[in-house]
């Protein structure tokens, strides 16, 4: 069967029309909807507020924060971070594949992102239950209040991220849809969730 | 040009958007008065600390006695303006290409939210201020009830913001820009942040805390200012059709008050 608009390159089928369409639009200022970047900026500002307040309280009581921080398992924090970084990598590969018109590959990468997201979610629930089992809860002390709050609000962003990934999969699923704009918008959201986690990880687990 | 009174009379008879402008001005006036009454007259915002003991709470009621009675007396008079506000917000969703269910759910949620989110607070604080000789523990009970009703129930508004967000994202009539949908999400997420106020009496997560109240209030003020501005633009663009809203034509709007749009009944 011959299709002039597509060529086979390795395991992936490349849709030349989709690639040409992408190139024609590649003069856009940012990937995805610029509107999503407004969200990224606004959320970054709100989280800057959270982080600033955390830092002020940490400065006022450094012993308590350092002592409580030592109770966290850095290995789980590193695992969390790696899982989200890999998920960001797979969503980036998803965007690239979609740009090239290799939708089957893009869909696989979107599923992979979903898998790493669920792995992060599971490890986070495991970590929380461990901390609670050790007797550390939201009201134990100031550090653990911030710990559960920041990881909790990030967790909520991740749950919304699953809805966003659902939209990306929905777009990639049928040839009738496949909006590159929405795929890139979804990826932008997912990267934001990842970026926020890296900041939270550095503040809660690493900073001494 | 004719006198202002003649212009108003002309608009009253001929401006097709009169009802929309009345509702919009009701919204502007309501939020101005709300800020004045809550922040200046009654001084219940920013909220006093959640950790105060009974004598301090009684002292606070005594210090704000007339402010609470007069301020909330006016508040009960203007609360009805919320009807016009909610109707206008629901109208924006009815103008979209989405199901009317969005507008009706939003209208229902926001109308009910005014009860715990505002009226219960006002009633409890007025009851507390009315008889300063009441048992101090009872006064403190009213104090806790009032501020928990005000701050602790913000989660109710979360669903409303999400409904508006989904409606804007699905809309094909370009009523609002998509970034406003995402701003709704930001607002909804900060409503979640208020939830720890049910647990904490001190610190950043108490009802007067830096995260629970201050940050949340900054986001809410920005959000409110943005939607008031966007609804004004929506009214200027309104053509009473069912398809996409036309782009805004600024010169007319700049040269005349908002109501001066050449649309005949």
Image: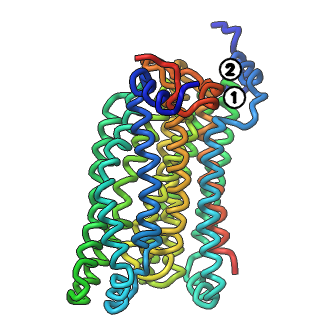
Of the image marks 1 and 2, the number of the one nearer the N terminus:
2
In the rendered image, the residue lying farthest to the front is B3
Q: How many marks?
A: 2
**Labelled pair 1, 2 in contact (Cβ < 8 Å):** yes
Q: Secondary structure at mark 1?
A: helix
Quadrant location of the N terminus of chain B in the rendered image: top right
* B134, A189: nearer the viewer: B134
Q: Position of residue A196 (x, y in %)?
A: 62, 59
Is A17 displayed left or right of B151 in the figure? Answer: right
Q: Position of residue A128 (x, y in %)?
A: 46, 71
Colour option used: rainbow
Task: State the residue at coordinates (48%, 19%).
Answer: B263
Subunit under mark 2 = A
Dot 2: within a 10 Å radius of its alpha carbon, few (fewer than 14), some, or many (20 or more) residues?
Answer: some
Is B186 displayed left or right of B108 in the figure? Answer: right
In this figure, which residue is indicated by the disc labeled 1?
Answer: A99
Q: CA distance from mark 1 to mark 2?
A: 7 Å
Task: State the residue at coordinates (66%, 7%).
Answer: A2
Task: State the residue at coordinates (57%, 69%).
Answer: A76
Subunit under mark 1 = A
A140 is higher (above) or lower (below) than A118: below
Q: Secondary structure at mark 2?
A: helix
Q: Position of residue A7 (x, y in %)?
A: 72, 17
The disc at residue A41 is none
B25 is higher (above) or lower (below) than A18: below
Task: State the residue at coordinates (57%, 45%).
Answer: A113
In this figure, which residue is indicated by the disc labeled 2?
Answer: A18
Q: Position of residue B144 (x, y in %)?
A: 31, 77
């Amino acid at each position: 069967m011959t299709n002039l608009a597509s060529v086979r390159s390795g395991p992936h089928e490349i849709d030349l029309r989709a690639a040409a369409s992408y190139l024609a639009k590649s003069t856009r200022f940012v990937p995805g909807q610029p509107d999503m970047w407004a969200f990224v900026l606004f959320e970054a500002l709100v989280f800057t507020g959270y982080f600033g307040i955390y830092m002020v309280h940490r400065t006022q009581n450094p012993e308590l924060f350092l002592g409580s921080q030592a109770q966290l398992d850095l290995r789980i924090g590193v695992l969390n971070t790696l899982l989200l970084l890999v998920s960001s990598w797979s969503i980036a590969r998803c965007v690239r594949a979609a740009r090239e018109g290799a939708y089957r590959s893009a869909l696989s990468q979107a599923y992979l992102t979903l898998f790493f997201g669920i792995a992060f979610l599971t490890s986070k629930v495991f970590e929380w239950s461990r901390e609670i089992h050790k007797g550390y809860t939201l009201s134990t002390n100031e550090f653990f209040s911030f710990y559960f709050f920041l990881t909790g609000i990030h967790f909520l962003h991740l749950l919304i991220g699953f809805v966003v990934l659902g939209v990306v999969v929905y777009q990639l699923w049928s040839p009738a849809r496949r909006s590159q704009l929405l795929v890139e918008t979804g990826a932008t959201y997912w990267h934001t969730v990842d970026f926020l986690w890296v900041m939270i990880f550095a503040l809660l687990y690493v900073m001494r | 040009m004719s006198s202002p009174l003649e212009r108003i009379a002309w608009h009253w008879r001929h401006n097709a958007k009169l009802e929309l402008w009345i509702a919009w001005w009701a919204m502007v006036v309501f939020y101005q008065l709300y800020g004045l009454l809550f922040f200046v007259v009654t001084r219940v915002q920013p909220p006093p600390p959640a950790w105060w003991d009974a004598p301090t709470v009684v002292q606070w009621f005594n210090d704000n006695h007339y402010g609470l009675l007069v301020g909330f007396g006016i508040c009960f008079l203007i609360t009805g303006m919320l009807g016009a506000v909610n109707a206008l917000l629901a109208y924006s969703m009815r103008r979209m290409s989405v199901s009317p269910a969005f507008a009706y759910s939003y209208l229902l949620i926001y109308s009910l939210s005014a009860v715990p989110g505002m009226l219960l607070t006002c009633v409890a604080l007025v009851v507390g201020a009315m008889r300063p000789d009441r048992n101090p523990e009872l006064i403190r009970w009213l104090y806790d009830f009032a501020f928990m009703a005000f701050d602790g129930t913000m989660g109710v508004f979360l669903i409303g913001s999400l409904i508006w967000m989904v409606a804007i994202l699905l809309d094909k009539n370009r009523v609002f820009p998509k970034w406003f949908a995402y701003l709704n999400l930001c607002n909804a997420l900060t409503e979640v942040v208020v939830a720890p106020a049910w647990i904490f009496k001190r610190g950043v997560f108490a009802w007067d805390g830096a995260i629970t109240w201050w940050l949340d209030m900054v986001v809410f003020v920005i959000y409110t200012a943005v939607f008031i501005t966007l609804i004004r633009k929506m009214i200027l663009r309104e053509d009473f059709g069912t398809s996409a809203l036309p782009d805004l034509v600024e010169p007319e709007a700049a040269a005349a008050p908002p109501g001066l749009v050449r649309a005949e009944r």
